[in-house]
Image (tube, rainbow, N blue to C red):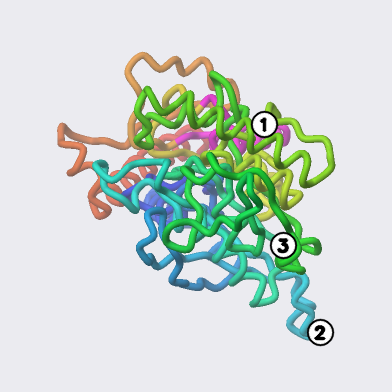
């Protein structure tokens, strides 16, 4: 029997690979002779850098960048070599940088009382991209999500060399040397004369799991602004600033721009900036990870596929990584088991047609803090997996 473990991280608890290792431990207890493969899984959010970098044998790089409120933060990203021949030729064009924008502009980097999209910036995201370019990367996988910003990407673009001007053609640099969401009010023109010249030769795959437009009632300001600190009185104002920024962008780029393109409103408008200024492709995060890690090959060779995540709920059905894995496994007619931390009350398992059975791992009454203790979570996953495969052993013997 050959089992493929591709389990998403249990956020704040265990990484994707750690979940796989725990499940594999339980499998070996029940079936010592079973073969298994552990593959990293992520959907573009938290854990994507770790999953892809480790899973593809890459290296981590820590860079000091400007955080969302201007304080310096240490942000980590990964670099992987996508072709073995590069080690011989020295050609660095196949180096891929894996970046989570939340590491430089994330909501978790600031306290709840500090949240204010008028004052936050994506400048640090541009610094990460610049650092990766300086190391020879020309391919990028960018995970959107968890941002503290709503600046439509102007901070990132500034860090990459774009310049912005007010209605009197006065250069806008920001009060502290970087532009924030509040500076959108003043932008009336922009220039790319000093833009990083390597950008045009880069490919950006953007892991984007929301379909929101940039502006309007379903846009970044209205839908995501409040959780980032926007007051009700500020939402419509910021939305108007962004609308004008779209017009300015259209004029500067001299091309067709659609602020309603699905995903443009992701990460406070970074989706828009990546698509129209950097030529990025907005894609489902789990699709990118599945393709980059060649998961289809591993699933096609499996007898049983085990996937999972921290919690099964309505968001699972909106394209989370286990859904993508399960669907592909069913194309190859493989049985699929999901191991999860918990299941949302009222969740309808029948809405997971590609999952044959799912199993929560909590084994006793406990607090959330106790359940998320890494040692406890590891033990629970291993024990649950052991029982699953003991039953499979009995049925198949």
Density class for disc 2 (Cα within 10 Å; few <14, some 14-19, many ≥20) is few
Q: CA distance from mark 1 to mark 2?
A: 40 Å
* Range of residues picked out in magenta: 317-338
Where is mark 2, residue-wise? 89
In front of the other: label 1 or label 2? 2
Element marked by disc 3: strand
CB contact under 8 Å: marks 2 and 3: no
Where is mark 1, residue-wise? 330
Percent x, y of residue 204? 71, 54
Q: CA distance from mark 3 to mark 1?
A: 31 Å
Question: In this picture, is 291 found above or below 263?
Answer: below
Q: Quadrant of residue 73?
A: bottom left
Going from N to C along the chain, the mark reached first, 1 or 2, is 2
Going from N to C along the chain, the mark reached first, 2 or 3, is 2
Residue found at x 65% / y 76%: 134
In front of the other: label 2 or label 3? 3
């Amino acid at each position: 029997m050959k089992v493929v473990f591709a389990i998403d991280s249990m956020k704040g608890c265990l990484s994707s690979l750690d979940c796989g290792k725990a499940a594999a431990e339980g499998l070996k207890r029940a079936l010592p002779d079973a073969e298994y493969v552990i593959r990293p899984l992520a959907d573009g959010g938290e854990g994507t850098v770790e999953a892809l970098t480790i899973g593809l044998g890459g290296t981590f790089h820590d860079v000091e960048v400007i955080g969302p409120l201007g304080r310096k933060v240490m942000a980590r990203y990964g670099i992987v070599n996508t072709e073995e021949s590069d080690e011989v030729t020295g050609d660095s064009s196949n180096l891929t940088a894996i970046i989570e924008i939340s590491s430089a502009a994330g909501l978790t980097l600031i306290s709840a009382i500090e949240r204010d999209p008028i004052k936050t910036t994506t400048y640090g995201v541009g610094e990460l991209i610049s650092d990766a370019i300086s190391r020879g990367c020309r391919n990028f996988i960018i995970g959107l999500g968890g941002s503290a910003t709503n600046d439509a990407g102007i901070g990132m673009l500034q860090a990459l060399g774009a310049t912005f001007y007010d209605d009197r053609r006065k250069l806008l640099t920001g009060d502290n040397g970087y532009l924030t969401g509040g500076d959108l009010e003043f932008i009336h023109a922009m220039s790319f004369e000093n833009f990083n010249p390597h950008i045009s030769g880069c490919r950006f795959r953007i892991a984007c799991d929301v379909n929101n437009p940039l502006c309007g009632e379903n846009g970044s300001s209205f839908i995501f602004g409040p959780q980032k600190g926007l007051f009700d009185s500020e939402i419509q104002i910021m939305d108007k600033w962004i609308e004008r920024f779209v017009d300015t962008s259209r004029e500067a780029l001299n091309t067709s721009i659609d602020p309603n393109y699905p995903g443009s409103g992701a990460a406070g408008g970074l989706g828009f900036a990546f698509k129209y200024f950097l030529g990025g492709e907005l894609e489902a995060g789990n699709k990118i990870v599945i393709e980059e890690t060649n998961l289809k090959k591993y699933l096609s060779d499996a007898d049983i596929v085990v996937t999972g995540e921290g919690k099964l709920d309505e968001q699972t059905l909106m394209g989370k990584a286990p859904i993508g894995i399960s669907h592909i496994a069913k194309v190859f007619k493989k049985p699929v088991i999901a191991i999860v931390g918990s299941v949302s009350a009222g969740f309808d398992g029948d809405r997971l047609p590609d999952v044959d059975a799912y199993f929560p791992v909590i084994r006793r009454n406990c607090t959330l803090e106790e359940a998320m203790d890494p040692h406890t979570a590891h033990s629970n996953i291993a024990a649950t997996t052991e029982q699953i495969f003991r039953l499979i052993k009995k049925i198949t013997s």
